[in-house]
Image (spheres, rainbow, N blue to C red):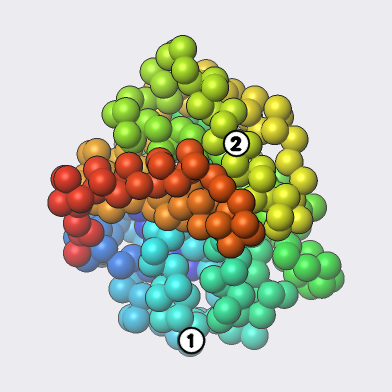
Amino acid sequence: MKVLVAGVGGMGSRFALKLAQAGNEVVLAETWSKRLQSLQTDGLQADLDGQEVQLKLPAYAPKAVPRETDYDLVLFLTKSMQLADLVQILLPAFGPHTYALCLMNRIGHEQTLTKYLPRERVLLGNTMWTAQMTRPDHVHLADDGSCELGSLTDDPDQVKMAVTTVNVFSQAGLKAHLLEDPRYSVFRKGCVNGTLNTLCTLLECNVAEFGQTTPAHELVVKVVKEFAMVGEKEGLHFDVAEAVSHVEDCYSVIGEHYPSMYQDLVKNNRPTEVDYINGYVATHAKQYGLVAPLCELLTGEVHVKEQLQNAKNDV
């Protein structure tokens, strides 16, 4: 499979490395200039499951990505606030048989992608792998994980591509699973992001440290209920108890992990994606005539922390 990985931070690096090591043809597109320079000079460098690896792959700024190449798949793993601009820039790279796959762990990305691409050409999913950018030229990839994806419609060609992608990813060791309803899975993963990402960032702790606190369970339940409330309005019927259990399983599975929002704001002083997580729930609750007070509060608190620290995007 020929794959264009759009966004080569921690998670993009994991998928690019594993797919390339399995024999797929992988091309990289990166917006962060320091990261792009490193990729072009030294290639992908990572501590991958305890072993230092280095792999040189073609890497371009999005506007410079070769257009004459017929990619099978464009895999989006960028920041949420960059997605709309990035997909528009990369539209000329989409051939007649190219599909988009979004594995970004936030909510509502299919709405962004389908503004610019036919719904029948968009695959959606999420990942439970972890990744950490240690510096612009290096990533740390540890822990066990998996990913899930599926098609947004029942178009036969789209369904076939989803199955093919699951097989390719699984052969690369990415432990992929096929979803009947990828929107449900993304929203369910949003519960993980809306609890652990946000709270670990505000409290400056890792996943296990948060889980060991007395108020953790009640906080998780309250946030998940707000996610479920909005999900119901969008046709997604949530099992709150199962979603809470899914979040709390992370305490032991990835307990030492500091979530991506923590890495962005606390470690690297960059703006977060909270508007696409708790902010999505708070905003859409208002649109449906509901209230999501905890998600609204958490969103505001993260933005206060961003401003107090004068968080800025890297260039």
Residue 286 drawn at (x, y percent): 55, 57
Disc on the earlier residue, 2 or 1: 1
Total numbered labels = 2
Residue 208 as seen in the image, left or right of residue 2 = left
Residue at 57% across, 31% down: 222
Residue displayed at 33% across by 58% down: 56
Q: Which one is in front, 176 or 305?
A: 305
Vertical placement of 307 versus 50: above or below?
Answer: below
Residue 67 is situated, as x and y percent measured from the top left of the image, at: 45, 85
- Observer-nearest of 129 and 300: 300
Residue 117 visible at all? yes
x 37%, y 31%: residue? 200
Crowd band around label 1 with a 10 angstrom C-alpha radius: few (<14), some (14–19), many (20+): some
Pick the residue in front: 206 or 49.
206
Residue 284 image point, x, y percent: 57, 58
Q: Amino acid at mark 2?
A: Val
Is disc 2 placed on a helix, strand or loop? Answer: helix
Residue 257 appears at what percent x and percent y?
40, 29
Location of the N terminus by quadrant is: bottom right
Identify the residue position indicated by label 1 in the image.
Answer: 92
Position of the C terminus by quadrant: bottom left
Q: Which residue is mark 2?
A: 224
Say above or below: 150 vs 83.
above
In terms of secondary structure, where does tag 1 sit? Answer: helix
- Amino acid type indicated by mark 1: Pro
Which residue occupies the foreground of this view, 276 or 230?
A: 230
Marks 2 and 1, how far apart at CA: 39 Å
Q: Residues within 10 Å of mark 2 (few under 14, many from 20)?
A: many
Q: Is residue 238 left or right of residue 289?
A: right
